[in-house]
Image: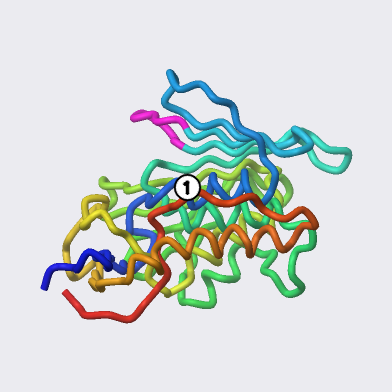
Amino acid sequence: MPPTPETIEVDFIAPRYLAGGGDPAWITVPLHRACGWSHGNDPLMPRVLLSSPGQKALLLLEPDPDGQWWTLSHAAEPDRPAWYASFGAHTPVELIAAATDTLTDPAPPTGAPSDPYEPLRQIGWTPAAADNGLVLPDGTAYLQRLGSADEPGAWFVTATLAPDRPVWQAHFGAHTPAPLVAAFTAALADPKPVPRIDGGRSLPSRDRNIITRRTTDVPAVYVARAPKERVHSLAARHTTPPTSPIPSRQPPTKNGRSR
């Protein structure tokens, strides 16, 4: 049955790391409206540039067919050298948002993971053959950390359909705060599916042995409410109330029928 004018057809995708990139506004709108990040305005450039209130952090979203589309960089601080994180175009926004939400949280919750390996070990990732890494048993995702115990290096997280078919890769520089990397791996390990409303166009594969796609007709009001609730939830961590968010396409999770 086709959706009615009051509903939107939403696909819920698992595993989430193979769901496609999603709506960038899930990240950029809360940073601006809930966390006070400022943005430039150059309509002739196909990019988004956001800077933190203290001008210490910068988020760049720039389409680059040969490289990472998202780059988060942070200036040096008294107790930490400058660091960066970058994400490929098909990295799900829910995973990137976990990192940016951690960065902008004025009071990280007690008990939040600080070891990037731990969320993955808890769901059965096993040691990789090299590079201080972990890998999913089916080989579709893996985590590596370069360097050694004495001189640890950068982190790399890769989702792939086959050894020669990578879907996306996330890089975290050697000095990236461990809780931020751990927030990303915890979101990666989360078994909950993520919503997409593009009709499956962003999926790297439609193989039912790899990806589960469940379709639901979601009330349009719920779709519009989800980004607003996200902005207000993040703004509640600060004393400054949020401005009115712009609509986004990200719906909440809702049970539905299978396809």
Quick one: 251 or 160, which is closer to the camera?
Answer: 251
Quick one: 80 or 111, which is closer to the camera?
Answer: 111
Question: Which residue matches tag 1?
Answer: 25
Q: Is residue 57 magenta?
A: no
Using residue 78 as the reference point, say whether residue 253 is left or right of it: left
Residue at left 55%, top 66%? 186
Q: Look at the image and name its color scheme.
A: rainbow
Report x, y in % for residue 105. 72, 57
Report x, y in % for residue 127. 49, 66
- Quarter of the image containing the C terminus? bottom left
The extreme front residue here reads 5
Residue at left 72%, top 55%? 241
Report x, y in % for residue 247. 45, 52
Query: Compared with residue 183, is residue 212 higher up or lower down, i.e. above or below?
Result: below
Which stretch is magenta?
62-69
Query: Compared with residue 257, is residue 169 higher up or lower down, i.e. above or below?
Result: above
Crowding at label 1, few (<14), some or many (≥20) Cα neighbours within 10 Å? some
Task: Indicate the quadrant where residue 213 lies.
Answer: bottom left
Task: Indicate the quadrant where residue 92 lies.
Answer: bottom left
Using residue 239 as the reference point, say whether residue 253 is left or right of it: left
Using residue 208 as the reference point, say whether residue 189 is left or right of it: right
- Quarter of the image containing the N terminus? bottom left
Q: Is residue 64 magenta?
A: yes
The chief SS type of the magenta part is loop
Report x, y in % for residue 157. 48, 52
The extreme top residue here reads 44
Q: Amino acid at mark 1?
A: Ala
